[in-house]
Amino acid sequence: MSRAEGSGEAEGSGEAKESGGPEGSGGARGRTVDSSRDDAALGELGYRPELKRTLGNFHTFAAGISYISILTGTFQLFYFGVTFGGPAYWWSWPMVFCGQLMVALCFCELAARYPVAGSVYNWAKKMGGPHVGWLGGWMMMTATMVTLSAVALAYQITLPQIDGWFQFIGDGSGQNDQAANAVLLGTVLILFSTLVNAFGVKLMARINSAGVFIELIAAVALIIFLGAHITRGPSTALTETYGLGSGTNLGYLGAFLTASLASAYVMYGFDTASSLGEESHDPGRNAPRAILRALIASFLIGAFILLFALLSVPDLKAEELSTGGLQYVVLATLGETVGEIFLWSVVVAITVCVLAVQAAGIRLMFAMARDNNLPAGSKLARVSPRFQTPVVPAVLIGVVGVVILVVNINQPQIFSVITSIAIIMIYVAYLMVTVPMLLRRLRGTWQPREGAFSLGRWGLPVNVLAVLWGTAMSLNLAWPRAEVYNATGPQHWYLRWGAFLFIGVVALGGFAYYWFVQRHRTGVLAEHRSQPADPTVPPSNP
């Protein structure tokens, strides 16, 4: 069943060679052999190759780093971290990186062995069985739709600061002006992303790679420009807590854990590099590298941006740090002209981040539908012969993303609530992979792909840390804090416990539907199987 077991049988079929043809690159013979081997490995998982392999090394790296999106995350939630943790919240950045690195290392082993679309779903299925796989895929798919909406909201934090013209609804001072305008801008962005993703992975990859190139150049330039305006040392900035947490049971630790959401939001989605595995060349070798490179690059660049922003801002205790966020720091430190250039780069980063999030969601929905694990699976898993991508999932995810925005149009707490729920669901979906993987390690039944990425003897301790980290951070993010889930207006228990309630309804309701209805229909659809189906034999569970 594994790619390791089938990687040596690289001859493949004519169909595999056709799907693996190069797109304007050299080394056609070697590329065809690699694609044939990849397609043969896909066949051992029970699927026939349908998505065209057009993505190279930088494309997969770009997909992972654009989902993480350094500029999007840091600019969207810097204000949150400073508000609840002060400048000392910076220390949550390396803390989150270390925890997520443990998860990423586990994912690298899985990406080397199972470089398949809908990575989290298929990994959970292989590690924990079909029921765990379905729940992990369902949580990840739902989280992706919420994440799509949450990221699209970042336009509101940036565009109106570039020019007040972008505040189309009101002047921004009304109670719901910003939330309503955020929904409008976010809707436009999601519609654009849906069109691009529907036209095929090649167009998406080109736009995404160009956007990531701009984002990386802008991020490095921003570090240099902020570094040239440093006015204080790290010992001053990184120990400033504003006295937050004093008088409470946990003291500053409680404030720090709340502020750590700002860092936890950024460093996830690195699995996207593997989720595009069926459209990439040699994904078993390249996907693990792309995962680690995307996470490490994001950590280093983000760490310096946040650090130099705190060291260079004119007034470390300015109220605007909690209202204008990193956008305020850039404009106040670098001036209007230079600052706006960098803010436009943030707009580009937000745009390609939305593209990557939706692209990952499309592959996940396709993977689950191909196993007939979703209603109307045959339609959802249909690959457009013209665009060579699943078009129906692109449209459906886009529509749901817009609906999520519209439902919250009059909610001033829209930013923190939607963001928090999206993060938690991603962490829970990751646990659906790392927990069963740990159980298989303990039972001695997990074997990484021979000759590929492997943690060796470090596999068990890394996996244990990944599970402990994922569990602890999920609880931390879901904790019923008023400042996160009921920051304004009257206090209501159902708002405070909103994360547990919403995620509980999604998980239990979804799994109940699967158990009583969809479970009995599960099985790789005939048109997607690696071998022609015998019409007299009913489908079996994957």
Image (cartoon, rainbow, N blue to C red):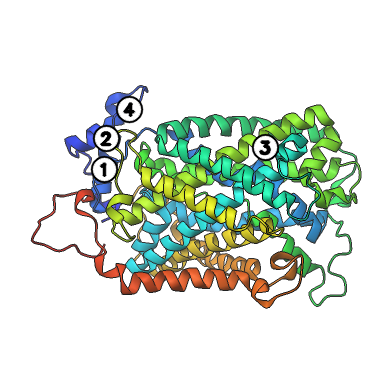
Q: Is residue 265 above or below residue 22?
A: below
Closer to viewer: mark 1 or mark 3: 3
Q: Please give left or right for residue 185 compared with residue 269 in the image.
A: right
Q: Is the Cβ of the residue at disc 1 closer than 8 Å to that at disc 2?
A: yes
Q: Nearer the viewer, mark 3 or mark 4?
A: 3
Alpha-carbon neighbours of circle 1 within 10 Å: few (<14), some, or many (≥20)? many
Q: Amino acid at mark 4?
A: Pro
Q: Is residue 517 left or right of residue 306?
A: left
Q: Which mark is residue 22?
A: 4
Q: Amino acid at mark 1?
A: Pro
Residue 104: tell me if it is visible.
no
Please name which of the two marks, 2 or 3, marks the residue nearer to the observer. 3
Contact check, label 2 and label 3, Cβ < 8 Å? no
- Residue 322 in the image: state x and y as whole percent: 82, 52
Q: Amino acid at mark 3?
A: Val
Q: Residue at x 35, y 49 (%)?
A: 116
The numbered disc on residue 346 is 3
3D distance between C-alphas at marks 1 and 2: 7 Å
Q: Position of residue 68 (x, y in %)?
A: 58, 46
Element on which disc 4 rests: loop
Label disc, if present, on residue 150 of the rendered structure: none
The residue at which mark 2 appears reads as 19
User: Comparing marks 1 and 4, which lies closer to the viewer?
Assistant: 1
User: In the rendered image, which residue does mark 1 sit on?
Assistant: 49
Label 2 residue SS: helix
